[in-house]
């Protein structure tokens, strides 16, 4: 799992590449735990190259969501592969998280 | 058709387990969505065995057996560690809104497994824990 951060004005985009599981979730957790994240209005998660997510990966997002919301930082996923979106659906997380079809839609969300 | 693999109890081996299950089901020409669901269910159980039952002790090992007959998939994961690990197969619906408020990381894995597989069973055999998962594949 590789996480690349792309800051642009008030938006930070995190590009995920690879499989997010109990072994690799710590990489994402470290990135989302950075204090400077809270200075952005939006954190966008580019999922185009995210090919797998397990409960450990979902847990990382869930564990940071309230902290981001409290700081008025909006977390938005975009470009999610169908099989990855399906995992969010199985748990009902698709109705609790902001998931946009494209980067443009994520920026407008 | 059937296939088996043995792995040591390191979470670095989760990728190997997923590749093994994917390869098995791809050769059976199942859809990408179904393959990913089964891969996820196995990954969750194996991760629990590695992390919670064996404390990531790489001297311990797990055996994984996949059997597909027509549309019926049976999966057996045997933990050769010395500690019995018998979580209930049926998991209550996790309150995800509460998890978000609490900033909770865990507690969703077995809920996923239960929703994906038709049957989830943990039992003891020869002083080892065995997990049996089954599913009728579309």
Image: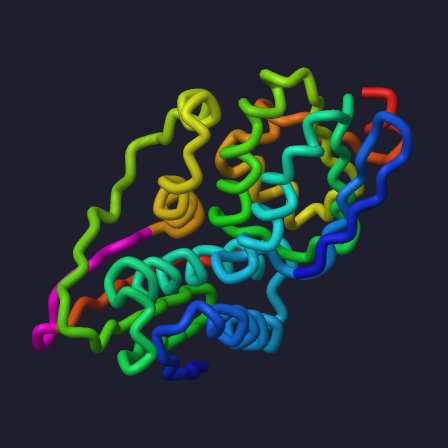
Q: How many labels does the image show?
A: 0
- Is A57 on the left or on the right of A42, as rendered? left
Mostly what secondary structure, the magenta segment?
strand
Vertical placement of residue A35 versus B54, above or below: above
Q: Where is residue B120 in the image (x, y as percent from the top left)?
A: 29, 53
Quadrant in the picture for residue A77: top right
In-front residue for pair B121/A20: A20
Residue at left offset 73%, top offset 48%: A81
Q: Name the outermost residue toward the front.
A: A35
Q: Is residue A37 visible?
A: yes
Q: Name the outermost residue toward the left.
A: B127
- Is A78 on the left or on the right of B122, as rendered? right
- Is B92 on the left or on the right of A35, as rendered? left
Residue at left offset 44%, top offset 39%: B105
In-front residue for pair B25/A32: A32
Q: Quadrant of the N terminus of chain B?
A: bottom left
Q: Position of residue A79 (x, y in %)?
A: 80, 42
Q: How is the image coloured?
A: rainbow
- What segment carries the magenta color? B119-127
Quadrant in the picture for residue A11: top right
Residue at left offset 53%, top offset 42%: A60
Q: Is residue B85 magenta?
A: no
Q: Where is residue B38 in the image (x, y as percent from the top left)?
A: 49, 59
Q: Position of residue A38 (x, y in %)?
A: 68, 27
Residue at left offset 46%, top offset 64%: B71
In-front residue for pair B16/A9: A9
């Amino acid at each position: 799992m590789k996480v690349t951060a792309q800051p642009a004005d008030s938006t930070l985009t995190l590009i995920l590449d690879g499989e997010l599981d109990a072994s690799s979730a710590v990489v994402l957790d470290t990135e989302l735990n950075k204090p400077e994240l809270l200075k952005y209005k939006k954190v966008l998660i580019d999922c185009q190259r995210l090919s797998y997510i397990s409960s450990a990966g979902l847990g990382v997002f869930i564990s940071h969501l309230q902290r981001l919301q409290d700081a008025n930082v909006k977390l938005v996923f975009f470009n999610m592969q169908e099989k990855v979106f399906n995992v969010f659906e199985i748990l009902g997380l698709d109705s609790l998280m902001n998931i946009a079809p494209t980067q443009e839609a994520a920026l407008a969300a | 058709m059937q296939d088996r693999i043995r792995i040591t109890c390191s979470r670095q081996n989760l990728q190997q387990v997923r590749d093994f299950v994917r390869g098995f089901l791809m050769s059976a020409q199942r859809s990408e969505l179904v393959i990913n669901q089964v891969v996820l269910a196995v990954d969750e159980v194996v991760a629990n065995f590695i992390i919670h039952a064996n404390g990531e002790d790489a001297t311990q090992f797990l055996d994984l057996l996949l059997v597909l007959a027509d549309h019926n998939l049976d999966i057996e994961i045997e933990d050769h560690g010395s500690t019995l690990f018998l979580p209930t197969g049926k998991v209550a619906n996790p309150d995800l809104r509460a998890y978000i408020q609490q900033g909770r990381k865990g507690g969703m894995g077995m809920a996923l497994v239960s929703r994906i597989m038709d049957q989830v069973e943990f039992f003891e055999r020869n002083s080892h824990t065995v997990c049996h998962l089954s599913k009728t594949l579309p």
